[in-house]
Amino acid sequence: MSDDAGAAPPSPKTDASAVLSIDAMGGDLGPEAVIAGLARAVRKNPAIRFLVHGDKPVLDALIAKRRGLSDHCSTRHAEGVVTMDDKPAQVMRRGRDTSMWSAIDAVRSGEATVCVSCGNTGALMAVSMILLRKLPGVNRPAISCLWPSRNKTGFNVMLDVGADIRADSDDLLQYALMGMSYARNGLGLDRPRVGLLNVGTEEHKGRSELRDAHDLIEALADANRFDFVGFVEGGDIPSDRVDVIVTDGFTGNVALKTGEGTARFVRDMLGEAFRAGPLSKVAGLLALGSLKRLGGKIDPRRVNGGVFLGLNGTVVKSHGSADETGVAAAVALAWDLSRTGFSDKLKARLSSVTGQVEAEQ
Amino acid sequence: MSDDAGAAPPSPKTDASAVLSIDAMGGDLGPEAVIAGLARAVRKNPAIRFLVHGDKPVLDALIAKRRGLSDHCSTRHAEGVVTMDDKPAQVMRRGRDTSMWSAIDAVRSGEATVCVSCGNTGALMAVSMILLRKLPGVNRPAISCLWPSRNKTGFNVMLDVGADIRADSDDLLQYALMGMSYARNGLGLDRPRVGLLNVGTEEHKGRSELRDAHDLIEALADANRFDFVGFVEGGDIPSDRVDVIVTDGFTGNVALKTGEGTARFVRDMLGEAFRAGPLSKVAGLLALGSLKRLGGKIDPRRVNGGVFLGLNGTVVKSHGSADETGVAAAVALAWDLSRTGFSDKLKARLSSVTGQVEAEQ
């Protein structure tokens, strides 16, 4: 399916849910890491097709180097690249020629249902909002992440982790519904448990918008087949008390980065401990398998992929520094969401609730 | 120095900075854990004297069981105990007979300069504010914590981690000055590096009070001999980029609990990894020393002690669940702060700045 004709889309007969739209530029490690990640993802899921956006000659050469990969890829040329320093407003005005814009536009046009990018988060959200537009009833879209936890699935969902620095009680309610739908489709949970992040679990605690959101979410739980566990605290994020953690984008972003930083810190300290003496080195060698399993479980690269929720189409934001493993993880997540028809299900869920809320009012 | 006469204070000749006022009730593990912690702390610092508040017969009996401890302790009877479920407002109205109230009152009266309690945080802050009152120029007192980091001292200071859920730009400025003074006296840093927690490091990011606080703190850095590193992110908290992390009490509390929860999660996963097979078990045994050193470094019990800043007197809040090790760590911290005359230094620092700000306006 290699595409030599320039901007041609995948064959018109191709099911759009089999195609992922990939922004191959703009990550810290450049298109090499992205193409390596695609090749790795295809080895696991040979049904994936990619529409890859960026510097076409460079991309075609990189794809040609990976045996068989060209059968899975079409490339579409885009002259420009959104850098990590570009301001979202600049990109909104002058970013039409970029690989990011092109990748999201392929979701708008229906050639793909999910887009993956390692680029600048602010610009990616801004362009996604222009091209895909918000779902009816959604005021602020959110970025959700998967968080390693003690749950059987191995993860919790947390949102918003940085789409917006504000959220009122209605936004938090929308986040609860979007996160619940994501947990149901992305983690396969029939009846997700939703919690609202606060500084204490007593109902009288926290800011007023949190107390209001508490009551709003509680009122919709039964009709939407989820359990509301009430307020949860930072210590509950990696726990098995809750599947979906709802918070504003400022708090969520700080929590996410704090958790990642702490895990990295503990891992580095552990590495030092194992280099501390000859006995420790032997122990380190013996423990290698166990430590690798542990590393796999808490390696942020393997849970790479913030999902933008609340738009007409799904965008997966990979870490800017994602390497081959990280890109492959983001692609695998995008593939799951694409194949389960998540975008349509989320839309249906939100419109049914919007209707219900209006009917009740 | 055991005190059989009831409410008598330590000998009037005793230097108040040698006396720590201890609320022995109200922790989850009861007075046994507190008294065990005092005994452990005294073994390290034999100059410490304690004024211990609570159920006197029970405390005297517990103290008598520890050889030599009675030479370091006076006990003062208090009938009531503040429980973890008591609301701060209740305790403010009806808590005069409690060990918590009595322990703080000994700082107010000048019998001690630092108080230690494992009790209910909200009630402890409320009673501290009534009895000790805010320092001139301080609007909101803050709770600061020590956070294990890559710094040479092994720690960063973060505040506020939960005294208040709000903070405007002036509050954040006060936090910066209080945290800087704490880092100077508690961690021995001549010129602490102060950072303001945000969702990005660019100056245009985040809420408006953060951008205002950025400029306010920057303007006072040179005159107060600290370096302002600007905005920092959650991932910087355990880093060596910064010594003092300034944030509002909502965000700080979520970050603290998220970090603790993540460290506990990684540690538990590690334990499981070492129990996974016979080879791993052998490795675990060989690595025991290294893992113990690691555990010591990241064990929240060993960095136990939130310090209330901004009051006339210093209050150290130990974890409610603190065991002997945890209590001893909180007492050691209180001892450092008492012996270095931290309360007076902080007061002088804030009043000099308040004067300066007024002079400039």
Image (cartoon, coloured by chain):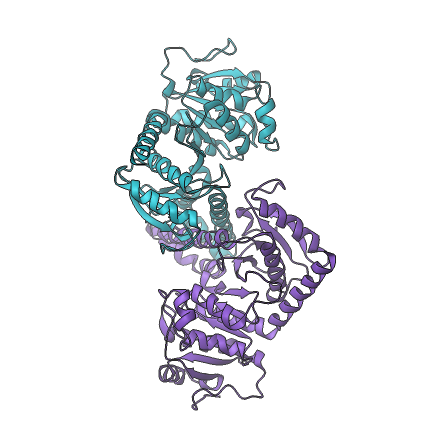
Chain colours: A cyan, B purple
Q: Could you say where residue A234 lies in the image, as x and y percent from the top left?
A: 42, 51
Q: Quadrant of residue B208?
A: top right
Q: Residue furthest bottom?
A: B5
Point 42% across, 39% down: residue: A171
Pick the front one: B301 or B203: B203
**Drawn side of residue A40 relative to residue B156, left or right:** left
Q: Relative to B122, say whether A234 is above or below.
A: above
Q: Residue furthest front?
A: A361
**Drawn side of residue A208 relative to residue B339, left or right:** left
Q: Could you say where residue B47 lies in the image, as x and y percent from the top left?
A: 55, 81
Pick the front one: A76 or B205: B205
Point 47% across, 31% down: residue: A327
Q: Could you say where residue B122 lies in the image, as x and y percent from the top left?
A: 44, 63
Let me know if residue A149 appears in the view.
no
**Drawn side of residue A285 relative to residue B228, left or right:** left
Q: Relative to B193, say whether A310 is above or below.
A: above
Pick the front one: B184 or B196: B196
Q: Relative to B139, say whether A264 is above or below.
A: above
Q: Quadrant of residue A185?
A: top left
